[in-house]
Image: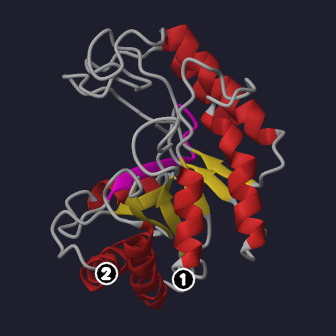
Amino acid sequence: MTAANTKWLRMDQPSDLRYAEFARQAEARGIHVDAIIQDWTSPHTPAGIAAEASAVVTALAPSGVHVYEVLNEQNNGLYTAAEYAAILRAVYPAVKAADPKATVLFGGLGVGRGLGSGYDAAAYLLDVYAAGGGGYFDAANFHPYSFPLLPSQQSLANPWSLLPVLRRLMGANGDAAKPIWITEFGCPTSPTGLYPGVCTDAQLGQQITNAYATARSATWKPGPLLVYDWQDDASCRDGCFGLYRADGTAKPAALAAFTGASES
């Protein structure tokens, strides 16, 4: 990761802290960690997730981890907007109490209904505001998978077109100063799995290059962009979005595009 000029690493951090040492090693090498607070072992209640968050932050903050993401794609059938707003209201003060310097990210919104499965990202964000969640995150977060379209291609079917909509919703709710992070984007390259045969290595590289260029020229106040994923798993169940194959060999076009974007 350091050889590829990686600046950010997003990884799950369940309350048993099984991945904590990896996060510490990343920060020690100058790679900032976005620690996703997951609810695998805690009670699935706001108080339970807040307790998990407090434990994770207490363990990781001394190592330099200061970004914490509250769940992942919660709009894809995991929690209603009202339930998620209650989680934010519990987790945000718990994280800030354990690390006043922390940045708390809204959990990455899946694309949602109309462009995928689940609860439409814009409608979900609006409903979280309506449920009182607006004061309990420091940055919004979206996963605009656009394949086979490039991020810059104008189309109602392109999730990147929702980013200005999210920005307007944030502005209308007093959050115009908050950035929108992109913590997942990419393109699957496996002939098997959930997305068989969508992209070649070259097309994945083109997605990465185009996404960074699109964000640099955007008016929707982009935060960091994080490519999904680093390395494929052996089953390629999710379509294998990685910069590396499961056997450890690189996808050369994709890795070169990522390294070039990281250097710019």
Give the label, 1 or 2, closer to the camera: 1
Query: Of 159 and 179, which appears nearest the observer?
Result: 159
Percent coordinates x, y for residue 204 in the rendering:
53, 18
The C terminus: image quadrant: top right
Q: Residue at x 55, y 17 (%)?
A: 148
Q: Residues within 10 Å of mark 2 (few under 14, many from 20)?
A: some
Front-most of residues 173 and 186: 173
The kind of residue tagged 1 is Gly
Residue in the image at 59% along x and 28% along y: 258
Tell me if I can see residue 137 in this picture: no
Front residue of 32/133: it is 133
Looking at the rendered structure, the secondary structure element under dot 1 is loop
Residue 251 screen position, x and y as percent: 45, 14
Q: Position of residue 74 (x, y in %)?
A: 38, 58
Q: Considering only vertical position in the picture, is 127 above or below 114?
A: below
The residue that mark 1 highlights is 132
Looking at the image, do the residues carrying marks 1 and 2 touch, with CB atoms under 8 Å apart?
A: no
The answer to whether residue 193 is left or right of residue 225 is: left
Residue 155 relative to residue 253: left or right: right
Q: Which residue is mark 2?
A: 46
User: Magenta residues?
Assistant: 4-12
Label 2: which secondary element: helix
Magenta-drawn stretch contains 177: no
Give the residue drawn at x 57%, y 39%: 144
